[in-house]
Image (tube, rainbow, N blue to C red):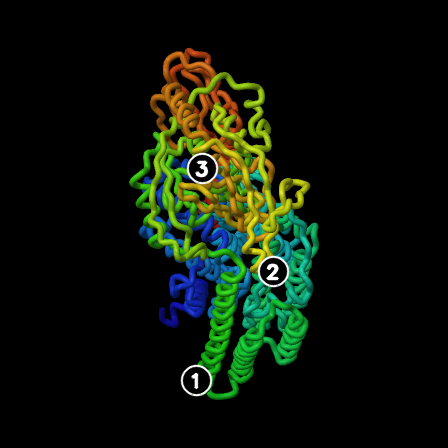
Amino acid sequence: MDRSTLRGRPRQAAALLAAAITVTAFCAADAVARSYPFGPRTRAVNDLGNQYVPFHAHLWDLLHGRADGGLLVNWQSGFGSSFLPDLGTYLSSPFALLVALFPRDEIDLAVYVVTVLKTACAGAAMAWLLLRLRPGRWWAAGLLGAAYALCGWSLADASYNPMWLDGLIALPLLCLVGEWALTGRHRLLGVLIVALAWIANFYTAYMATIGAGLVLLLRLWLSGLPRRRALAAAGRAAVTVALGVGLAAPLVTVIYFGTQHAYPGRVTHFAPVATQDLLARLLPTTYGFGSPALFVGTTALLPALALPFHRAAPVRVRSGWSLLTVAVTLSMQWTPTHLAWHAFTTPNGSPYRQTFVLCALLVIAAWHTLSYGVPDRRALTAAAALLALIAAVASRSALVRSFAWPVLSLAAVGALGGLVLLGLDRAGGSAEGAPAAGRRRRLLVGSAVVLLVGAQLGEATATSAVATRLRLDHLDDYAPWGSRQQRQADAIAEADGWPAYRTDPGREQTVGNDPMVVGGQGAQYYSSLTADVLSRTLTALGDGWTSRGRNIQSLDNAVTDAIFSVGARVHSPPDQHQRWNPRDRSPVTVSRQDVPPLVTVRPSTSPSARTGVSAFGPSPYRNQELLLGTRVYTVPPLTVRTGDGGQPARAAGDRPGAVIEAPRTKAAAAHRPTVAAQCPAGSEVYLWAPHFSGTARLTATPARPLTGRFTSDAAKIAAMQRLGTAPPSGRVRIELSPTRTGSVPDGAVGCLDTARLHDAVQRLKTTGATDVTVSDGTVRAQLPAGSKGTAVLAAPRIAGWRCAAGSAPAAPAETYYGLIAVPLDGSATSVTCTFHPPGLRLGAAVGGVSLLTLVLLGTVTAVRGRRAAHRTALRTTTRPRERTTSAL
């Protein structure tokens, strides 16, 4: 791009520069940290590996026609989960569609590229906005746009929560919409931008809308418009936002109702961080999960700090932007305004998710400083003093590590040096002749740009690299797609028989959403929208979970496999990336069992069955028998002994049972606690200990015993485990190896009679559906003639299911201990169940009204424009004739 083009198109040039700096710093940081895809360290930490990459993999399958399910129901996860709320929460960004262009086994690379592109677009959008707010140097706008895109919130938090990056893009775009509202331009485009922002990610769009509203109110105050015109502009902005959100309503309302039916997460209470921690996050290379990542780079922070002292800027501009920045900072630390920023719910995890709004205000303040000219010596001295004060207070914070000081020093020297050189250019621009002045100016400006860009690049690269490395120390991490996932996927593809039966990816999971990554149809499911009925039903059956009930695990149990028609199950060795027994080189195998069809017929349901999950009792073994309809377990009394043979203490409260303490010494670890019980000979032995952590193993059994691994803490409970076969004597002895103090409940051991289970399965197959077809949100089953009682679909009865027997009208599905149920009177030979996400009809109605209103407003505006143009044309054509007549 030549110089004349840059002069003619400063906004495009600024946007390109911002994007280029952003991509360079982002990728360079990962190269420095040796993180994927530039090094051996995985970047799939926490929910990125557990949720976002799997959801993008499922989207890839949907786009290529390979997924089980569609937009309405995801049949691969949670035995059938509502997908549209998940789509709106994680995948509705237009950028997400780009994953379809990558190979399926490069899904991690696809998500990485999408993340980089979103971050670059945020920088470009901010650079464009800055030049719209005030004219100025295009390269300065590009530099500050990159400072916004590479802010601490983006690098430390949003880089592994890629859907949040849509909010980073939305904020400058929504501010542009506010600018258009001031002048009454681009009304249709403004509505579409608002709608797209709320569709892409409604959560951060909500915060971005608040931030853009605050910017617009300040702009109205600074504009000095008469009250009537200011109110008109505010009204146009409000209508634009209302119509845009209305157009997004079909997705937003589905998400809202999905959260109403989700399993309740942890209830947290907000506590503001200490002042030194707050200020520390303004500095480079600081990292902390529970504090606001305010870093914008010294090249942006210094001009922002200089604004109150910049005499070239009007007083209203200086005071307005400075006060707004301070007010938003304080709002992050006060509970009522904190709740307002987060839709009146303190989020799980980082409590400062609105931080990107404050980062944007710092960047905009810096732009107003530079756009009025380079700050003079007085202003720069005051800014440097404030920066030194911030550093002094922040030095008391544990978030500041030793390597922050050299990075900050170099960045400060570069930023101050660049600003001083720009000041010299301005001061001496006309002191020499024209040719000499031009050369001197180019040299000074070029040197200043090199210093400022170099400081920004170096500081952002270091900050991002440190955040990438420290995340691996603080959060769980998962390996990208590799040989393990490929072996799992191959085994599932060979065994898959859906919908005749389900294929479960297995108990030894790789990530929390294995079915979406490697295929199959299992219980595993991790989402912020995990249905309450699913979590409670599977917990009552002995399943385990993490993330306080929202990450459901696979349950390797013969009875639940029969209940949910799991006819094939994959068995993999423990994931070596999670450092579970790295010497285990067992191959991936598949076990099969005879199971009933997806739709079975049970006797008429009792009133307790229709109450759903509340009908379950405390024993998961008895709860499984309720769903199966047959007694198949013996639940014997237990004898629990400590490692020295004594009786353990009893736990009270919500975790009753025998207390199992972790050994404190190696000598104590050699004497292990035991659980003894008497089971029928040859029965399968299961141990249910949801609040025990460690391993359990059968002793004195002729068959090869299994090692059950249990993990529990405040955020997770352990799943029931099969340990092996009871010996001929029936005396079962289970040896425990605890890793932390836990408990073993009464009734922890279940002895499964496999012959009774086989008979129960045969009866359910005989009376069950003869044919089942599944297509997205519709399930159809053909039943034997004369079927009476209750047809049960082996899927959780989440809100939105409607069913009909034969030609009867559809009605809300009933429940059979938490599963979908349809009453039968003997006349129907088929059952049809359809799923409609709650809130979709309401959202569609609101969206339709918004679209109609938008069309009417557009039509009225067009008619008024034509009439105005017609009147202008008439006046133009009649004026010469009037003048001629008067002359005559």
Q: Secondary structure at mark 1?
A: helix
Say what amino acid the circle numbered 2 marks.
Pro
Which quarter of the picture shows residue 318? Answer: bottom right
Q: Earlier in the sequence, mark 3 or mark 2?
A: 2
Q: Is residue 791 left or right of residue 636?
A: left
Dot 3: few (<14), some (14–19), or many (≥20) neighbours within 10 Å?
A: many
Dot 2: few (<14), some (14–19), or many (≥20) neighbours within 10 Å?
A: many
| Location of mark 2 (residue) | 292
* For discs 3 and 2, the disc positioned in front in the rendered view: 3
* For discs 2 and 1, the disc positioned in front in the rendered view: 2
Name the spot of residue 399 as percent of width and height, x first: 61, 67
Name the spot of residue 621 as percent of width and height, x first: 52, 32
Q: Earlier in the sequence, mark 2 or mark 1?
A: 2
Q: Residue at x 34, y 33 (%)?
A: 498
Q: From this viewpoint, is residue 13 visible?
A: no
The N terminus lies in which quarter of the figure?
bottom left
| Location of mark 1 (residue) | 439
Say what amino acid the circle numbered 1 marks.
Arg
Name the spot of residue 883 as percent of width and height, x first: 49, 50
Which quarter of the picture shows residue 218? Answer: bottom right
Q: Are marks 2 and 1 in contact (CB under 8 Å)?
A: no
Residue in the foreground of this view, choosing between 728 and 581: 728
Residue in the foreground of this view, choosing between 277 and 853: 277
Residue in the foreground of this view, choosing between 54 and 783: 783
Dot 1: few (<14), some (14–19), or many (≥20) neighbours within 10 Å?
A: few
Q: Earlier in the sequence, mark 1 or mark 3?
A: 1
Q: Secondary structure at mark 2?
A: loop
Q: Which mark is residue 727?
A: 3
* For discs 1 and 3, the disc positioned in front in the rendered view: 3
